[in-house]
Image (cartoon, grey):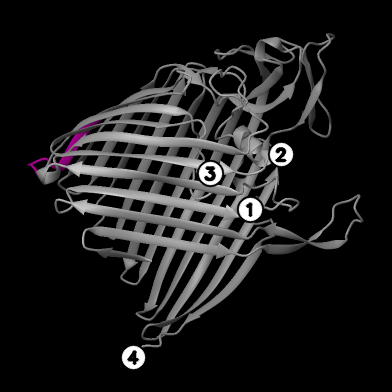
């Protein structure tokens, strides 16, 4: 239910999904091939509510929001230790603007709470959004006996509009914030400060229709006071009288710390880096126009990446529209995480060894869309996205010490490493010493995918339509590691496809 009454804007949504079951085949050791039925989704209620009130003809607004997820994960069910029982998130926000909206002050403050079994809340603390198990973080502690987790998030920002514009914003999310039941969050545990200042033309002149330049900074710290991001960048853009436009941007990142690099392990140093990109677009009024984007970045460890995307938009006739956009990227990482293993002898890294490698990766993609209007009542839309990516790992190495970007390469600086004929690597981290050996599979990859669909739409009477849909997906994987465009693209069409055909009809009961 949504609506507006006077100065109030309201929205409510509630959904109940029943328990779902699936037929599965048991795994070897439990009567292979036996078909059993098991629950795969619990009875769940989802709720979202939003209210906002306007003041001063909309110059000031104050609002609130509440979301709730309630699952039936009763004791003894298959979901008890897998899913959280309850998840609640709520808060308030505001925005106040001066007359003409030259200055705007805004902000929000909200909190979250999740509850469940000790196993479910333990998994929440350990997942990549939180990493409560970090051994050198003295301000958080993993508690396996917890049955709830609380957190908050807030922001306040001041912005100025006009030819000269800018903003100042401060934001924080506590370590216990959890939004992934009714939203999405990549990480928590940060306090961030960002600034922006720029100039934009508001009138065309004899050279440009518009132009501008800007600069911004970002700094982020975790709740332990470690600086976990630092960056500054600037750029400029312009639209010429012929409606072509171009933009450039460059940035620099001083060295800072990372509390996510070791995937729940100790802090690491991130090398200083710089980046640059350029983009442009031709006159979109033409039957054929193009856009492009190119970027390059590099850090002081020798890691680098480059990316090139070119797009074309064509309307050869009034009833045919074709767009396609090939993209090619290359990446070399000097610190790609492979795995970690427990070893009491690894005292410098808190009883675990963190294994990394160099990674060289190449990715090629192509987005293609065709829109064909046969008549005002009959049309066809076709979309296809082939995608191939290859990555080769080399120089397997061990993270040497917290708060550094130092590594010891196996077989060169430390221990031994060997690869079996089946592609399994075995590492003895100290050679003839007491440290136990460990193994891992060959992480090289060649991924090939194709996603495509075609939709035929026929409006057989006013307001009523028939849709015929064909979807196809092809997916393949091999641990080769090297990139060959001809081989990898060709292998897409040698994989077995999954095809789905759908028919949908609508009928308008009105006049």
Q: Dot 2: few (<14), some (14–19), or many (≥20) neighbours within 10 Å?
A: some
Mark pair 4, 1: CA separation? 49 Å
**At x 60% / y 33%, what residue is drawn?**
125
Q: Is 137 above or below relative to 460? A: above
For this view, does 419 lie left or right of residue 91? Answer: right
Q: Secondary structure at mark 3?
A: strand
4 or 3: tag closer to the N-terminus: 3
Up-down: is 304 above or below 312?
A: above
**Magenta span of residues:** 203-214
Expressed as whole percent of the image width and height from the top left, the position of residue 228 reads: 46, 22
Numbered disc in front, either 4 or 2:
4
The answer, for residue 286, to whether it is visible in the render is: no
Disc 4 element: loop
Q: Quadrant of residue 205?
A: top left
| Mark 4 touches mark 3? (CB < 8 Å) | no
Q: Are marks 4 and 2 in contact (CB under 8 Å)?
A: no
Which residue does the numbered mark 4 point to in the structure image? 511
Circle 2 sits in a helix, a strand or a loop, which is it?
A: loop
Pointer 2 residue: 479
Residue identifier under label 1: 492
Determine which quarter of the picture holds residue 157.
Answer: top left
Disc 3 marks which residue? Answer: 364
Q: What separation in Å lies between label 2 and label 3 (alpha carbons)?
A: 17 Å
């Amino acid at each position: 239910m949504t609506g507006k009454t006077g100065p109030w804007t309201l929205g409510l949504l509630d959904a109940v999904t029943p328990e779902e079951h699936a037929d599965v085949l048991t795994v070897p050791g439990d009567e292979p091939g036996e078909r059993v039925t098991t629950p795969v989704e619990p009875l769940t209620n989802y709720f979202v509510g939003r209210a906002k009130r306007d003041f001063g003809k909309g110059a000031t607004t104050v609002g609130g929001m509440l979301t709730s997820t309630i699952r039936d994960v009763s004791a003894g069910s298959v979901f008890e230790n897998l899913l959280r029982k309850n998840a609640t998130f709520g808060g308030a926000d505001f925005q106040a603007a001066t007359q003409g909206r030259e200055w705007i002050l805004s902000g929000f403050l909200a909190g979250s709470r999740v509850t469940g079994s000790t196993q479910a809340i333990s998994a929440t603390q350990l997942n990549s959004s939180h990493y409560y198990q970090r051994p050198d973080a003295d301000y958080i502690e993993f508690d396996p006996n917890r049955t709830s987790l609380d957190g908050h998030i807030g922001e306040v920002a001041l912005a100025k509009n006009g030819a000269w514009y800018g903003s100042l914003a401060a934001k924080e999310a506590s370590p216990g914030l959890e939004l992934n039941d009714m939203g999405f969050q990549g990480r928590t545990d940060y306090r961030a400060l960002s600034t922006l200042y720029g100039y934009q033309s508001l009138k065309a002149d004899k050279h440009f229709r518009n132009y501008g330049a800007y600069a911004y900074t970002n700094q982020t710290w975790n709740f332990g006071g470690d600086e976990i991001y630092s960056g500054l960048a600037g750029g400029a853009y312009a639209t010429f009288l012929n409606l072509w436009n171009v933009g450039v941007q460059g940035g620099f990142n001083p060295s800072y710390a990372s509390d996510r690099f070791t995937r729940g392990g100790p802090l690491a140093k991130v090398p200083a880096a710089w980046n640059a990109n350029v983009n442009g677009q031709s006159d979109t009024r033409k039957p054929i126009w193009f856009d492009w984007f190119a970027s390059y970045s590099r850090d002081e460890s020798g890691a680098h990446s480059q990316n090139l995307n070119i797009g074309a938009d064509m309307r050869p006739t009034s009833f045919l529209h074709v767009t396609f956009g090939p993209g090619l990227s290359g990446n070399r990482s000097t610190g790609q995480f492979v795995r970690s293993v427990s070893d009491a002898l690894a005292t410098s890294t808190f009883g675990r060894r963190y294994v990394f490698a160099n990674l060289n990766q190449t990715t090629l993609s192509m987005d293609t869309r065709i829109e064909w209007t046969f008549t005002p009542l009959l049309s066809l839309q076709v979309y296809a996205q082939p995608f191939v990516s290859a990555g080769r790992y080399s120089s397997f190495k061990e993270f040497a010490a917290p708060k550094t970007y130092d590594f010891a390469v196996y077989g060169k600086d430390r221990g031994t490493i060997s690869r079996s004929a089946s592609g399994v690597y075995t590492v003895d981290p100290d050679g003839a010493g007491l440290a136990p050996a460990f193994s891992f599979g060959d992480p090289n990859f060649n991924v090939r995918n194709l996603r495509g669909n075609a939709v035929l739409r026929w409006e057989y009477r006013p307001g009523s339509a028939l849709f015929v849909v064909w979807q196809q997906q092809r997916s393949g994987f091999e641990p080769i590691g090297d990139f060959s465009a001809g081989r990898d693209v060709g292998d897409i069409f040698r994989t077995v496809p999954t095809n789905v055909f759908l028919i949908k009809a609508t009928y308008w009961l009105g006049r």
